[in-house]
């Protein structure tokens, strides 16, 4: 039977509503939910392909389907039953706690968990075990935004909402490539601009991204200089009389100190520090301050920094100084990267936070939470944050680690330390939906978890909107929900741990000690959520006015207290709630000018500019920054299963400016060593006009699953985060993933290999996984999928000299190049080997698989032949000829721009060359002709750029 289930996209913090179509317990389709206020039916390239990542073939090849125990490190894990697995986990954790104390264990969880999962894990660590060693990958994503809001506005609450985009007169986008990272919000920006052409967009970024390409004013600053820019803007605002003196006087404190500080941020000083023109600085300040309503949108460019909190606070200072807050179209609006980073913050699922935006450092808050949970106390000592936790494990201080729904061996900075931590920890549990993340290789115990399409609970998006996540199908195999796993483990552990003294009396109104100890009585996600809801009573995020049933009907924004008239007061008595009906949430905060501080006034932060932790120097002359790709998500456990999502960016690369490449004698595609003080990787080089001189860029997604190799000292090299630094912001403890000083040098690896094949869907992903295991046997290797309708794999490698034939034979076998009829050529003396398999289907013969070893100069045309499935019967001999020139008749392959309709850059350029008229007319003609950009819209910013770049033939003539 065909079924439709309303749920939420599991990728970014926009939090789009989806409708999942399923039949006979299989997900068969997905579309945007037209009634969801985050997206009104739209989905980006990632969201609209979700169903393709949940096919039976993908599940069978990528999912962890039963608990597994690894008896010895380095060996394959063996299956075991759930009871045995959870008993083992509880015993090992209890033994560690008894022997070394509660701080000898740590939990590293994820912004992709649901709020209910997060709540249980937080209570398990802080309430049951008595350690604050629980942190999350959200630490890498938004902890600076949390600290910035708290320091200035008094609470971790983004005050604006998506609707404010429709009311803003100036959008100030800083450190955010929203066009790629928050695409559906960006569609809203495009629409707002169409409706109101007067809307000004200012983009601040070291890179000229697709987002920057749409700006009226692009402020291309030097990496890490945001605080200098914002202070310099404030300096000008004061000089020009653009500040709102009344707002400053009546709604804020601390301005005089900041005013004295920004006196030094003269236009000359700021222009020089940021590497921008003084006119640009002036225009940025003018647009921000004098527009009727200015909304700032910001993300990792501000957060992932050793000055992350100061960057956030300096930007919020501008809103406070100009009164651009608490009114339609205005306010500082941090965009969350992950789907439920906000939910994690709400339940206090970080090492320094407690439930419902309470602070661990506040004794009253600790007592309130202890009373709510029915435990004697919540420990006072701050827990280890992400970087500190892995450092402690590497130093032998944390001995048992529980990792849920995240892949630190790919995503953490300074991966060498992380790898040491995972190796040294005595017991590592990995609770995961997928079997493919690198972190699984380090697990002593693997616990299979449910994932999107199967999970049940809630998430909160960037605009404080809580949405339901609903199961369309049951979890496969023996996979269980994350919250259930945590509860089952906690119940076991509760029996093994020594009983802590009886709880003290809690503050009036909060739940008191249960007569019988049962800290985890939950049977449903709703029962977990109800306890979380109670914890928010009287807090800034009060959600006591919402029920699960109401959330089933419509998503809701917090705060939404049960008695809106009572607002923020602490009231211990639960109010009888209507089971259903419309929810009155708050879309915009601080409209009354009252902030959640002791005196109701916001605080200016006295922000000082500090350079990046690791400035460029002569030995490491490039500033490496990392960021997202348009069609990929994080470590690519899910998006990486689809070849079509590799059409836009097909393979790992490091980018630098064309000028720097020329000056250093580099050529496009050549292999380079990228080296920081922490590690070195080999990766192909690509020119990018987006980068200024002295900068380099690499996508954050490329981990050991896709890019690997072996250093000369025999250490495995592990993707981009082998290079990044774990230096972090002293307030937020968020690491500086956006900047590392590196050197880039030519790699001398003359022997090269390219192997490609189309694969049957039932083993395409397992074949790729088998190839991935071979990557470490080459100094450089990468392995990626390709293909829109079909599944293909591309394996690339390089070495100092020819590798042994046995290794090549292994690759050939995996790609089906051991089949009868395979064409072959080998010249052992010259390290050359070639194999090609042609396949006849109907009238046509195409290239099915190919391996070029020792000489890959013919890659371009052979790759075209295979990937475009062109007639190949006449190319047999040519395929085996080293360095054979491209046959003239072959159309060149080019990058895919539109994922939905598989439209290539070449096709777009050819069409645009024929289209005249205005920019919007040419875009319209292009879309009508090729359909590109007419579905999810993710490629529209790039199409607009191409419209500007490609001159019509008539005009050119
Ligand atoms: Fe998902 Fe794309 Fe929406 Fe983000 S913008 S929630 S990735 S559909």
Image (cartoon, helix red, strand yellow):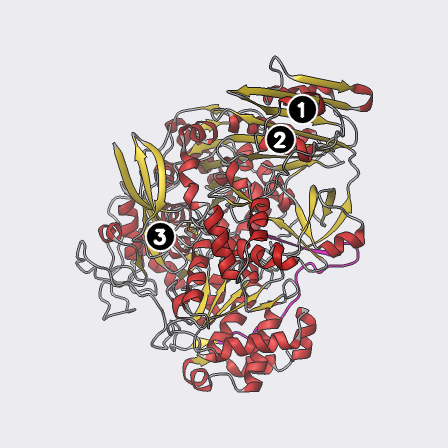
336 left or right of 588?
right
Up/down of 234 relative to 373, above or below = below
Q: How far from the left and from the top, in percent, is residue 301?
A: 56, 60
Is label 2's Cβ within 8 Å of ligand 1? no
Residue 941 located within the stretch drawn in magenta: no
Q: How far from the left and from the top, in percent, is residue 245?
A: 47, 86
Name which of mark 2 and mark 3 comes first in the sequence.
Answer: 3
- Label 3 sits on a secondary structure element that is loop
**Which one is in front, 626 or 867?**
867
Q: Are marks 2 and 3 in contact (CB under 8 Å)?
A: no
Residue at (34% x, 57% y) in the render: 465
- Asked if residue 895 shows in the view, the reply is yes
The magenta span reads 604-627
Q: Are marks 1 and 2 in contact (CB under 8 Å)?
A: yes
Say which residue label 1 marks. Answer: 875
Residue at (39% x, 67% y) in the render: 166
Q: How far from the left and from the top, in percent, is residue 2?
A: 27, 34
Say which residue label 3 marks. Answer: 376
Up/down of 673 relative to 441, above or below = below
Q: Which mark is residue 903?
A: none
Distance of mark 1 from mark 2, alpha carbons? Answer: 9 Å
Quarter holding the N terminus? Answer: top left
Residue 607 located within the stretch drawn in magenta: yes
Q: Nearer the viewer, mark 2 or mark 3?
A: 2
Say which residue label 2 marks. Answer: 865
């Amino acid at each position: 039977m065909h079924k439709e289930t309303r749920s939420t996209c599991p990728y970014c913090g926009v939090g789009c509503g989806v409708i999942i179509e399923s039949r006979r317990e299989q997900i068969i389709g997905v579309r945007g939910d037209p009634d969801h206020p985050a997206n009104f039916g739209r989905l980006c390239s990632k969201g609209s392909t979700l169903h393709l990542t949940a096919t039976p073939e993908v599940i069978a090849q990528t999912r962890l389907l039963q608990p597994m125990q690894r008896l010895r490190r380095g060996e394959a894990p063996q299956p075991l039953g759930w009871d045995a697995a959870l008993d083992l986990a509880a015993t090992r954790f209890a033994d560690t706690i008894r022997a070394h104390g509660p701080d000898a264990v740590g939990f590293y969880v994820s912004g992709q968990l649901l709020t209910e999962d997060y709540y249980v894990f937080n209570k398990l660590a802080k309430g049951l075990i008595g350690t604050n060693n629980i942190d999350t990958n959200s630490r890498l994503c938004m902890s600076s935004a949390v600290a910035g809001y708290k320091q200035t506005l008094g609470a971790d609450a983004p005050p604006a909402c998506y609707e404010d985009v429709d009311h803003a007169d100036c959008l100030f986008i800083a450190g955010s490539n929203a066009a790629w990272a928050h695409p559906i919000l960006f569609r809203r920006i495009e629409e707002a601009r169409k409706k109101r052409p007067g809307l000004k967009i200012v983009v601040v970024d070291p890179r000229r991204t697709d987002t920057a390409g749409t700006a009226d004013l692009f402020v291309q600053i030097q990496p890490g200089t945001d605080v200098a820019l914002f202070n310099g803007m404030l300096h000008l605002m004061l000089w020009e009389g653009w500040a709102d003196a009344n707002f400053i006087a009546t709604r804020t404190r601390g301005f005089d100190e900041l005013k004295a500080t920004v006196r030094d941020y003269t236009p000359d000083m700021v222009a020089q520090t940021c590497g921008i023109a003084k006119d640009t600085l002036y225009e940025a300040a003018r647009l921000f301050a004098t527009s009727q309503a200015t909304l700032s949108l910001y993300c990792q460019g501000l957060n992932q920094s050793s000055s992350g909190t100061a960057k956030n606070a300096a930007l919020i200072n501008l809103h406070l100084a100009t009164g651009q807050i608490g009114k339609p179209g205005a306010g500082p609006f941090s965009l969350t990267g992950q789907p439920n980073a906000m939910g994690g913050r709400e339940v206090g699922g970080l090492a320094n936070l407690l439930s419902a935006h309470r602070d661990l450092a506040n004794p009253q808050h600790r007592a309130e939470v202890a009373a709510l949970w029915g435990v004697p106390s919540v420990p006072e000592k701050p827990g280890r944050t992400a970087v500190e936790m892995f450092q402690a494990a590497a130093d032998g201080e944390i001995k048992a680690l529980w990792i849920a729904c995240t892949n630190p061996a790919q995503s953490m900075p300074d991966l060498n330390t992380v790898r040491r931590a995972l190796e040294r920890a005595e017991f590592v549990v990995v609770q995961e939906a997928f079997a493919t993340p690198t972190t699984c290789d380090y697990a002593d115990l693997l616990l299979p978890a449910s994932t999107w399409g199967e999970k049940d609970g809630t998430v909160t998006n960037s605009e404080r909107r809580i949405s339901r996540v609903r199961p369309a199908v049951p979890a496969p195999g023996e996979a269980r929900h994350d919250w259930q796993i945590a509860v089952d483990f906690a119940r076991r552990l509760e029996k093994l741990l020594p009983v802590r003294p009886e709880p003290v009396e809690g503050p009036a109104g909060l739940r008191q000690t249960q007569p019988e100890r049962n800290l985890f009585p939950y049977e449903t996600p709703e029962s977990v959520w109800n306890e979380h809801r109670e914890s928010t009573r009287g807090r800034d995020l009060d959600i006591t006015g919402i029920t699960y049933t109401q959330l089933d009907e419509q998503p809701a924004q917090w705060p939404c207290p049960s008695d809106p008239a009572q607002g923020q007061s602490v009231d211990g008595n639960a109010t009888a709630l209507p089971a259903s009906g419309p929810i009155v949430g708050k879309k915009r905060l601080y409209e009354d000018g009252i902030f959640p501080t002791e005196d109701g006034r916001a605080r200016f932060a006295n922000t000082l500019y500090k350079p990046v932790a690791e400035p460029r120097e002569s030995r490491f002359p490039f500033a490496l920054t990392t960021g997202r790709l348009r069609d990929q998500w994080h470590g690519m456990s899910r998006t990486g299963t689809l070849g079509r999502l590799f059409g836009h960016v097909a393979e790992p690369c490091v980018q630098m400016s064309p000028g720097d490449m020329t000056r250093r004698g580099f050529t496009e595609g050549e292999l380079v060593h990228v080296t920081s003080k922490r590690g070195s990787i080999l990766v192909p080089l690509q020119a990018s006009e987006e980068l200024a001189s002295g900068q380099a860029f690499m996508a954050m997604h490329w981990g050991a699953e896709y890019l690997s190799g072996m250093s000369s000292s025999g250490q495995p090299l592990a993707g981009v985060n082998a290079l990044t630094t774990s230096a972090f912001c002293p307030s937020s403890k968020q690491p500086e993933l956006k900047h590392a000083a590196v050197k880039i040098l030519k790699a001398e690896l003359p022997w090269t290999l390219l192997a490609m094949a189309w694969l049957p869907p039932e083993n395409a992903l397992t074949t790729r996984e088998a190839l991935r295991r071979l990557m470490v046997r080459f100094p450089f290797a990468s392995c990626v999928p390709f293909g829109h309708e079909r599944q293909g794999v591309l394996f690339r490698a390089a070495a100092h000299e020819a590798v042994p034939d046995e290794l090549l034979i292994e690759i050939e076998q995996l790609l089906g190049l051991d089949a009868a009829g395979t064409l072959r050529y080998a010249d052992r003396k010259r390290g050359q080997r070639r194999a090609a398999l042609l396949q006849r289907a109907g009238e046509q013969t195409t290239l099915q698989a190919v391996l070029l070893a020792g000489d890959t100069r013919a890659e371009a045309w052979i790759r075209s032949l295979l990937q475009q499935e062109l007639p190949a019967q006449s190319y047999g001999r040519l395929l085996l000829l080293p360095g054979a020139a491209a046959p003239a008749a072959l159309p060149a392959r080019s990058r895919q721009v539109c994922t939905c309709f598989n439209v290539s850059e070449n096709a777009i350029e050819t069409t645009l060359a024929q289209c005249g008229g205005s920019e919007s007319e040419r875009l319209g003609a292009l879309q009508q002709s090729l359909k590109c950009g007419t579905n999810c819209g993710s490629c529209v910013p790039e199409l607009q750029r191409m419209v500007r770049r490609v001159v019509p033939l008539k005009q050119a003539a």
